[in-house]
Amino acid sequence: MSTPLLSGTGIAKSYGPTPALRGVDIAVGEGEIVAVTGPSGCGKSTLLHCLAGILRADQGQVEYREQDLGLWSDSARSRLRRTEFGVLFQFGQLVPELTAAENVALPLLLAGSGRREAREAALTWLDRFDVADLADNRPGAMSGGQQQRCAVARALVTEPRVLFADEPTGALDQLAGEQVLDQIVRASREQNTAVVLVTHEARVAAYADREVVLRDGVVDLTGLGIGVDR
Amino acid sequence: MKPATVARLALAGSRTDRLRLVFTVVSSALAALVLLAAATVVAVPELGTSRDGSDGWNHYTSSLLAEPGLRPGVVLTLLLLAVPVLVLTGHSVRFGSPSRDRRLAAVRLAGGTRRQVVLIAVTETGLAALVGSVLGFGVHLLLRETLHRPAPDGRLPLPTDVIPPAWMIALTLLAVPVLAALSAAFLLRHVVITPLGVLRA
């Protein structure tokens, strides 16, 4: 691989005395979809949080475009999340009191866009994910699949270079999950967006170009899926 | 972030956020009442007019109001009384509710900086305190009418015959939300709002 877009080297992170990551190396190229898999508690989500700049690693380096994110301020890493990075969680990332359009427009509004301009962009993305008719509905009035499609639209509305998805289909039934994954892959291919996809499900990992398996906070070098190109 | 966005996110609370808003409104109304009382005492003229038409002490039953030398003490006492009430108003920002915490964490996840989410939380307090301040002014006018009970000799128990100048009223009504917001911002320095949730020290 040429110089990766995003890389982690020797990432270690502990919660009190409990180590979550113990020296993980990972690299993600432009437009590449990398699945991070492994059993519950192996450190997948912590790795994603470190790579996305949500958590600071205790040791090691996270580099984005060859810049060490560990040296960036909290504000600079926040700005990255509304410009270059998109973040998608299993649930809980939509604001219940805002409409679908307002939720999708949120990163643009935080960046200083006007409401009309941000709403237009949000409607375009909601339309891409076939939920434009729900633009004025609040999350509570939508199904889990519809909410997650709105969340994907929000993560992609800024046309990020990297999308971080943490168990994005964990709360969905199989059909809704497949629809969401199809849309993530389609958007990634169209915009050349790299995706870091955390999952414990093999069928979800199958959407990725490459798979990295974690076990007990380290990359499982004995696993069958390590660095396998699909 | 544009002011309209800040206001929208600040006022996007759910039903569970109302208790905090009611608390902020009530405590800021109380603070406005105390500060308006202080402004009223400040506005009492140095000397009043005696019943025979000559200059003399004001016609109040209490010497604390009638004697000009004692009034600064009354004003200071009222101002000191307002301080804990204003701090109480600011404290309301620390009363989290799961929905507010979720909202602020979601804003952080979407790329909001710590400064932006603090601004949202402080704006919520400031706007609620502004409503409380106006409410306090209404109660002040009501009490002014209700408590205007001159004794048979014409003397008054309270300075209900005095209205502070308009600029002083405006300053008082604006001071409450501004001080409540500043107090809230100060208190939020111990609250860590991350994309993963809100932690209180």
Image: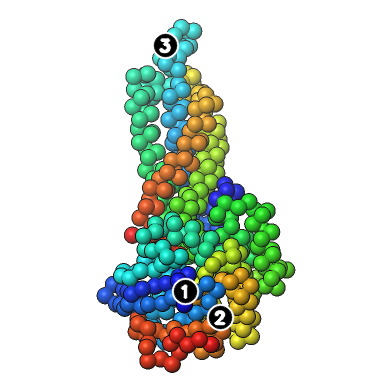
Q: Which residue occupies the foreground of this view, B29 or A193?
A: A193
Dot in front, 2 or 1: 1
Residue in view at x 55 percent, y 66 percent: A160
How far across and how far down the image is residue A117, in percent?
66, 54
- Between the residue at mark 1 and the residue at mark 3, the CA separation in whole angstroms equals 93 Å
Which chain does the numbered disc 3 sit on? B
How far across and how far down the image is residue B165, in percent?
52, 24
Instruction: Report which residue position mark 2 lands on.
Output: A169
Which chain does the numbered disc 2 sit on? A
Residue in view at x 41 percent, y 67 percent: A63
Q: Residue furthest right?
A: A133
Instruction: Report which residue position mark 1 lands on.
Output: A2
Q: Residues within 10 Å of mark 2 (few under 14, many from 20)?
A: many
Dot in front, 3 or 2: 2
Q: Residue furthest left?
A: A17
Which chain does the numbered disc 1 sit on? A
Q: Earlier in the sequence, mark 2 or mark 1?
A: 1
- Amino acid carrying mark 2 in the image: Thr
- Between the residue at mark 2 and the residue at mark 1, the CA separation in whole angstroms equals 31 Å
Q: Residues within 10 Å of mark 3 (few under 14, many from 20)?
A: some
Instruction: Report which residue position mark 3 lands on.
Output: B56
* Marks 1 and 3 on same chain: no
The image quadrant that residue A100 belongs to is: bottom right
**SS for dot 1:** loop
Residue in view at x 59 percent, y 65 percent: A159
How far across and how far down the image is residue B27, in percent?
46, 46
- Left or right position of A3 against A181: left
The type of colouring in the image is rainbow
Instruction: State if disc 1 and disc 2 touch (CB < 8 Å).
Output: no
Q: Is residue B89 above or below residue A121?
A: above
* Marks 3 and 2 on same chain: no
Q: Residues within 10 Å of mark 1 (few under 14, many from 20)?
A: few
